Amino acid sequence: MTSITSLRHLNLSYNNLHGPSPSTNQFGTFTDPSDFEGSIPLDFGHVMTKIQVLDLAGNAFTGSLPNSITKAKQLLRLDLSDNHLSGNIPDWWYDLQQLQVRDLYGNDLSGSIPPSICSPPSLFWLRLSRNNLSGELPRSFRNCNGLLALDIGDNNINGTIPEWFGESFLSLQMVRMTGNMIDGNAPTQLCQLSNLHILDLSHNNLTGSIPSCLGSLRGLKSVKFYKWNPNYYYFSYVFTSKMELVEKGTKKKYTFTLDQVNLIDLSSNNLHGEIPKEITNLSALGTLNLSWNQLSGRIPEDIGSMQKLETLDLSSNHLSGSIPLSMTSITSLSYLNLSHNNLHGPIPSTNQFGTFTDPSCFRGNPGLCGKPLMTDCSPAKRKETERKLKMMMMSMK
């Protein structure tokens, strides 16, 4: 039998907790944690003053975050993800000066992001995704100097990505803002984040062209494994990073391999202009998704220099020209989608392209011919196809 007041680590995550919610008096000398649900006891922090790791993820806790959590002054990691917590995120994070990990993913929290959310300076992991948060990014984000990962995806955040974003987050390695209502031009200030290896701004309202300076991101030019500082290991409890990303057309939950993911996802916005050739400098990039935009022009000829590319999705744009032959040299490429563009000419058949046998990868390009499409690449057929394509292009003007 363990006294709750002496606990430093409490992990009740992913237990399918059920039954009546105990008070902290009942909680105080527990032998079986399998009956907990309901709200988090209001005096939780008053009793558990020495708690350092609190992990209640993946349960059915309801209600709001109790103010007494601020009394747990030694708290290093707080994980309340995958519950049913509701109400606003409170603005008392200044009181938790030791906190390094804050994970509130997958709840029913609403309102705006409070000013104190980036406190304390030791915070390196902030995940608020899959809630009902609204409003703009708070100016207090400028204080998040030590932040390594920021995940605010799948909310109702609006406004633009501010100018100071690149100056304040120089340590950032992972940014996930997918599924919001963020607008304005695709921000060039992101190019200042030299350690960035995950950038997901998909499913927003971004406009303008893709910044060519993204090709200067050092974190995507060489393969390296990002390791957390040893101080982030709390006794026998190792911090496990968690993030949802789309790779190879499927949403996946990454945990232990997240530090190995190199990804840029700008899909489902209103970006226009050409794909900047500088993007081919990102030789360590594993996933590039620019689908469902208004991009035009040709696919960069030097795209074959991106030898680590495993996923390439350029579908549903207005790209023209032929498929660059250099793309056949990307032997790591296992997922390709070029459908619904204005590409023309024969589909390459050598090397990796011999594995792309699904016609849907190329469908919706009237000028493409060859396997796996049924369109014949003979000179007469190609001439007729080019004539029809030219007429179609003229009718679009």
Image: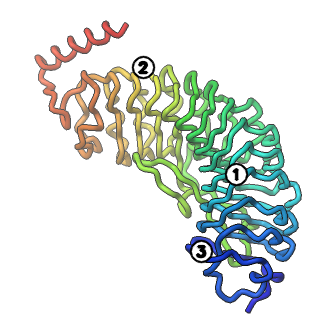
Residue 300 drawn above or below residue 12:
above
Say which element carries label 2. strand
First in sequence, mark 3 or 2: give its number: 3
Q: Which residue is mark 2?
A: 297
Q: Which residue is mark 3?
A: 17
Question: Crowding at label 1, few (<14), some or many (≥20) Cα neighbours within 10 Å?
Answer: many
Q: Position of residue 299 (x, y in %)?
A: 40, 27
Residue 148 numbered tag: 1
Q: Residue at x 69, y 75 (%)?
A: 21
Horizontal arrangement in the rendering, residue 248 relative to residue 140 (left or right):
left
Spatial separation of the CA atoms under disc 3 and disc 2 = 55 Å
Spatial separation of the CA atoms under disc 1 and disc 2 = 35 Å
Q: Quadrant of the C terminus?
A: top left
Q: Position of residue 394 (x, y in %)?
A: 31, 7
Q: Residue at x 57, y 38 (%)?
A: 201
Residue 167 drawn above or below residue 259:
above
Residue 388 occupies quadrant: top left
First in sequence, mark 1 or 2: give its number: 1
Q: Nearer the viewer, residue 310 or 304?
A: 310
Residue 218 occupies quadrant: top right
Horizontal arrangement in the rendering, residue 320 relative to residue 375 (left or right):
right
Residue 378 drawn above or below residue 214:
above
Say which element carries label 3. loop
Q: Quadrant of the N terminus?
A: bottom right
Pointer 1 with pointer 3, Cβ within 8 A:
no
Q: Nearer the viewer, residue 387 or 10?
A: 10
Residue 190 appearing in the image = yes
Q: Nearer the viewer, residue 240 or 229?
A: 240
Q: Residue at x 51, y 45 (%)?
A: 284
Residue 358 numbered tag: none
Q: Position of residue 240 (x, y in %)?
A: 62, 65
Q: Amino acid at mark 1?
A: Leu
